[in-house]
Amino acid sequence: MPEDVDRYAVALDVLAATSAALTALLEPLPAALWDFSPAPGEWTPSQTLTHMLSVETIIIPVRVRAMLAEDGAPMPRPAAEAPAAPPAETLRAWRAARAENLAFLRGLTSEQLARAGLHRHYGSITAREHIIEWAYHDLDHLRALQATIEACLYPEIGGFRAL
């Protein structure tokens, strides 16, 4: 990738676009697919969305705010995952939290983004790095959700399975 690309700006764009992507993928899902796992040990769409809500509300924004409050401090350990709720409710809560988080992230200065926290496994991570990873995390789960839906559709594509 060219060095003149502002990866933080790209990350914010991804974070903003995830709301529409999640809505487009998940709102039309029939109830039976919410608990469908494509393989043993793979998350269902419901589990993925519940995890994404936890990341959105009790993990990454909490860590970033802790970095801003005390540069170099250990990152707080996440609280328990969000409890499971009906998918439509979880998606609404996720979208609301994402909108709040984007407003917060867009207001951060370069000095704030340079502040760091100490992750127990990965060492020193800046706020900027963690926010960029947040976008990467979104893309990873969008890819997994797409794969789950593909796994549901695959048996019914007939001869195209040879592709």
Image (cartoon, rainbow, N blue to C red):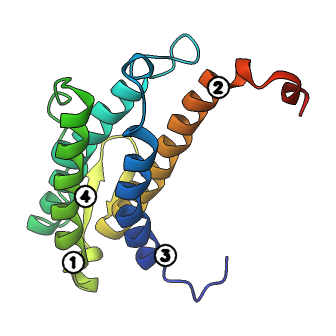
The local secondary structure at tag 2 comes to helix
Q: What residue is disc 2 on?
A: 153
Q: For marks 3 and 2, give the one nearer the viewer.
A: 2
Q: What residue is disc 1 on?
A: 112
Q: Is residue 113 above or below residue 36?
A: below
Q: Is residue 124 above or below residue 144?
A: below
Upstream in sequence: badge 1 or badge 4: 1
Seen at 41% across and 75% down, the residue is: 8
The answer for how far apart the CA atoms under marks 3 and 4 are is 20 Å
**Amino acid of disc 4:** Gly
The answer for how far apart the CA atoms under marks 1 and 4 are is 12 Å
Q: What residue is disc 3 on?
A: 7
Q: Nearer the viewer, residue 103 or 163?
A: 163
Upstream in sequence: badge 2 or badge 1: 1
The answer for how far apart the CA atoms under marks 3 and 2 are is 35 Å
Seen at 45% across and 23% down, the residue is: 43
- 35 displayed left or right of 90: right
Q: What residue is disc 4 on?
A: 117
Q: Is residue 94 above or below residue 83?
A: below
Upstream in sequence: badge 3 or badge 4: 3
